[in-house]
Amino acid sequence: MISALPERSAHIERAIRMRRSFTNHLVTGLAILSTAVVLVPLVAILGYLIYKGASSLNLNFFTKVPAPVGEPGGGMANSIVGSGIILAVASAIGIPLGIAGGVYLAEYGRGGLMGNAVRFTADVLNGVPSIVMGIAAYGLIVVHYKFSALAGGVALAIMMVPTITRTTEEMLATVPHALREAALGLGIPKWRTIMSVSLRTATPGIITGCMLAFARVAGETAPLLFTAFGNNFWNFKLTQPMAALPLQIYVYALSPYDEWHRLAWAGALVLIVLIMLSVTLVRLYANRGTIKGGH
Amino acid sequence: MTQPNPVTLPTPIVEPAGRTPPQGPPPPAETAQPSEIRRFLRDRSSGRAADGTFGGLMLISALSIFVIVALILWVLIHDSQLSIHAFGWKFFRTSNWDPVNGSFGALPFIYGTVVSSFLALLMAVPLSLAVAIFVLDICPPALRAPISFLTELLAAIPSVVYGLWALVVLVPIMRDQVGPLLEKWFGWTGLFAEPNFGVGMLTASVVLAIMIFPIISSISRDVMKAVPIHQREAALALGATRWEMLRIGVLRNARIGIVGAVILGLGRALGETIAVTMVIGNHPDIVKNLFNPAYTLASVIANEFTEATGDLYVSALIEIGLALFLVTIVVNAIARLLVWAVTRGNSARTA
């Protein structure tokens, strides 16, 4: 046994050990260095956004519609409201559909071929580029009808469904089986068990999932380019083209005017703050008085 | 076997005496007057129809995902018929994009998409893995939460904001600082040559790399975390250094999942639209020079769709969308299968 080990002098042993130790330190150093390299642009983006955005914000931004080219002032009030309306449409379609799909996966389709197929399709649909959703909504609605807030809402809703389905399924899977069995054992029908026990227990997690999907589509520009189309004036009709914050930022960012760049930064900051605010508020509200899921 | 069981059995709930028929007056017949509770429960459980309806609704919602995919596919195929019939496979092999003369070839966009995504992966993958390793194994616990939070925050920033930042901050840096340096050091390769406007393939790749970094980093971190702790312990017990432990115990076991994470990042990069459109320069060229403006599949749709005049033009753009859809579906399917294979195997092993 011992003779099988190669004979090495102390000198070689030390050299090998030093090389190993050197590689180890090198890799550690590289990992630390790359983290620093990555964190720099991250912090730079956030810092620049807050700095430029906050310095460009004023009351006009929240109360005025965009000013014509060459005129100073103007704001994005119509875009903020428009984004809210389009997102409300998207949520109204996407959230119920997504949650119901997740309930099917968790409560009916567990382990079955059908369940796996749905799960896989949802994951794949999740990765489809948003611009493709935009073209699809264009071909399905705009071609037969016209550019409208409704078409934009549908495009965003399609993007919300797979995310919500998968998170709902995962959250329902954490609900202990004993709870369901207790309810069924009392003679409560399955649909009632799902509504009052499974979904009720998993509510905080499901809401988190919904808000993640919401935050993801709230910043989307590509699907709205040829559906909601944008609008420089007030519009509250779902059947008309409607302004949206990301669209307006996109248009202003590509413009050659400094004034519009300034507004684009303000819009970007407002967009991110509004997304985070709505997500936090909904989660805070939903967490009051609900039963915690999990074990 | 012969020894008596030392565990005391719970006393039976039903007393033997209770089994004897009751001596007193017989209990009220159930059929005559069901108790309040019984009636309540029977009303509740009589919902066979409700149960079926509910299950059906859930099934329909789940099926709607198939319907969505089918509808998207059908619309894209249907609306691109004109272009498919006019050009056939030649559409993807020719590089002449001339809307005025009605000649359309998608090769420059395919080139732009492939090269920009590849460059983005080249930059993002090593950094993502290094950060994943740093967060998991090297960084002090106090730093772990802030770094994870920052990474997640980055994933939440809308694409248009990245584009705005890149246009205002990154483009001048690429034009005035990074560009000249690259040209001085690597100009001989022909990849970095004047003129450098700041907007172009390289800048778009850098933005893409920043955008796909969070997804690759967080998924590969999850995959590496899923490697059983014994693997690490065994490597360390044999006297491995930290890097040897990571290489032998962690990276080797997690490699399939890491490949899956990279492919997921690739899928994201292939389809990224707005930020790329804003900084890539939007010019259908196939040139080696990375400073040159380029065009991608997604950005040509975003940029030209609303201005497209003529049915053939629109149809050609929709065919590009169809190609993008099919490619990202294949890429994502492969990535999902890989990630599933790893995480499923692990949960089975630890169970």
Image (cartoon, rainbow, N blue to C red):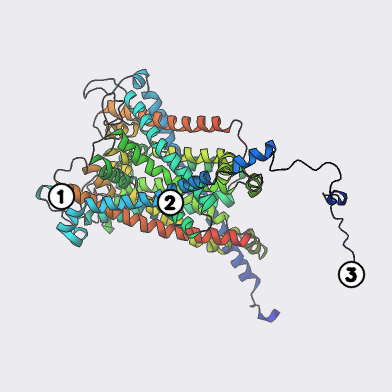
Residue at 65%, 39% in the rendered image:
B39
* Residue identifier under label 1: B312
Say which chain tag 3 marks. B
Do residues under tags 2 and 1 come within 8 Å of each other at their CB atoms?
no
Q: Is residue B89 above or below residue A61?
A: below
Q: Quadrant of the N terminus of chain B?
A: bottom right
Q: Amino acid at mark 2?
A: Ala
Q: Secondary structure at mark 2?
A: helix
Q: Amino acid at mark 1?
A: Leu
Residue B71 or residue B142, whichever sits in front: B71
Question: In the figure, is residue B137 to the left or right of B31?
Answer: left
Residue B2 circle label: 3
Task: Locate residue A285, reporting x and y percent.
Answer: 54, 29
> CA–CA distance between discs 2 and 1?
32 Å
> CA–CA distance between discs 3 and 1?
90 Å
Residue B47 or residue B71, whichever sits in front: B47
Task: Locate residue B8, reporting x and y percent.
Answer: 87, 55
Q: Is residue B137 above or below residue B142?
A: below
Task: Locate residue A168, reporting x and y percent.
Answer: 51, 45
Q: Which label sits in the foreground, 2 or 3?
A: 3
